Image: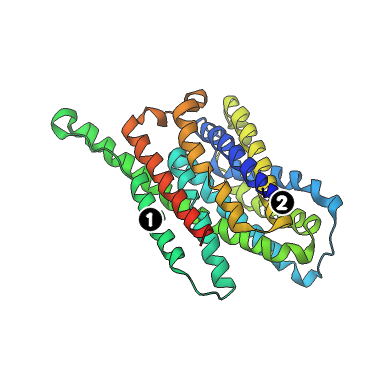
Amino acid sequence: MKWHLLFPFTASLLYIVSALFLKRAQQLGGGVLRTTFIANVAIALVFTALLPMGGKGQPASLLWQPALVAALFVAGQVFAVLALSLGDVSVAAPVLGAKTIFVAWFTTLLLAIHLPWQLWCGAGLSFGAIILLNRVPRPTAAANGDADEQAHHEHRRRLGQTLFFSLIAAASYALFDVLVQKWSPAWGTGRFLPIMFALSAVMSVVFVPFIREPWHAVPRAAWAPLGAGTFFMALQSFAFVSGIAMFGDATAMNVVYSARGVWSVAAVWLIGHWFANTEGQLGGSVLRWRLAGAAVMTSAIVLIVTR
């Protein structure tokens, strides 16, 4: 038993809780940029717990390394929040599982290793999974009329946005993971991660002027899910990223973490109504297609890991 895989397993569960809370916060007017700023500050604070671990550190001339990784983290988080707020959690979370394909891809490219057939096959399976996740039953014009036809097109547009933002987030996070594994040993976990996440919090300040509504204008009802969502996001980041920094094995870590795609479909179906999430009302056929997509994407990830 590889006990270090408990880190990403725990993170995958915490992620789904965070996603449901943040989705609800956005519905109540929490705001994407505001959420990103608060989350990054919370994550930076949580990672100060690693400071006692220390580390060798590196000269100031190499500060660009944690700065680059911080920028990738901020980019991934922005696009993930956009995907969750503009689309459906049960689509965004499984597609974010494509991150493992990107991790294998970036690791191979950075190490100049020949791409095996399993990687290309896994990429094809992930594409097939996206098609399944994007499948929407088409209403009959005779029975539902133009209004339902328009709603159908609107739903497909929202799905397209979800897929687009989720894939960009997955690629950003994948490169983030690879570079954390590459640079953390030289710095030391107690140095690289606290510095990097402190920089990500500083970078988030640039979003503040673009937050259109003043802080006091945020509905009171939005603060509870916003606070809970950012708290659980900070905890899942701590569990997952510290695991990669300390133990490496980023590909295996991501395989376990990708289970969040399956958890998300189950959570929306079973307890989504607790968070006023209506995705479970889309119909059994839609969620069955999404569950099939999550299963295919998981198969792609397993293929990559067992190559």
State whether residue 248 is above or below residue 91: below
Percent across and percent down for residue 27 are 49, 32
**Disc 2 or 1, which lies upstream in sequence?**
1
- The residue pinned by badge 2 equals 242
Percent across and percent down for residue 182 are 68, 66
Q: Which residue is drawn at 50% across and 32% down?
A: 267
Residue 122 vs residue 94, the one in the foreground: 122
Q: Is residue 85 visible?
A: yes
Q: Indicate the amino acid at tag 2.
A: Ser
Q: Quadrant of residue 282?
A: top left
How packed mark 1 is, by other alpha carbons closer than 10 Å (few <14, some 14-19, many 20 or more), is some
152 relative to 109 in the view: left or right = left
Q: In which quarter of the image is residue 223?
A: top right
State whether residue 224 is above or below residue 105: above
Q: Is mark 2 on a helix, strand or loop?
A: helix
117 relative to 177 in the view: left or right = left
How packed mark 2 is, by other alpha carbons closer than 10 Å (few <14, some 14-19, many 20 or more), is many
Question: Which residue ends up furthest to the front in the rendered image?
Answer: 1
Question: Which residue ends up furthest to the left in the rendered image?
Answer: 142
Q: Which residue is drawn at 71% across and 62% down?
A: 66
Q: What element carries label 1?
A: helix
Marks 2 and 1, how far apart in space? 30 Å
Q: Residue at x 50, y 53 (%)?
A: 302
Q: How many labels does the image show?
A: 2
- The residue pinned by badge 1 equals 127
Percent across and percent down for residue 72 are 60, 59
Q: Indicate the amino acid at tag 1.
A: Phe
Q: Quadrant of residue 38?
A: top right
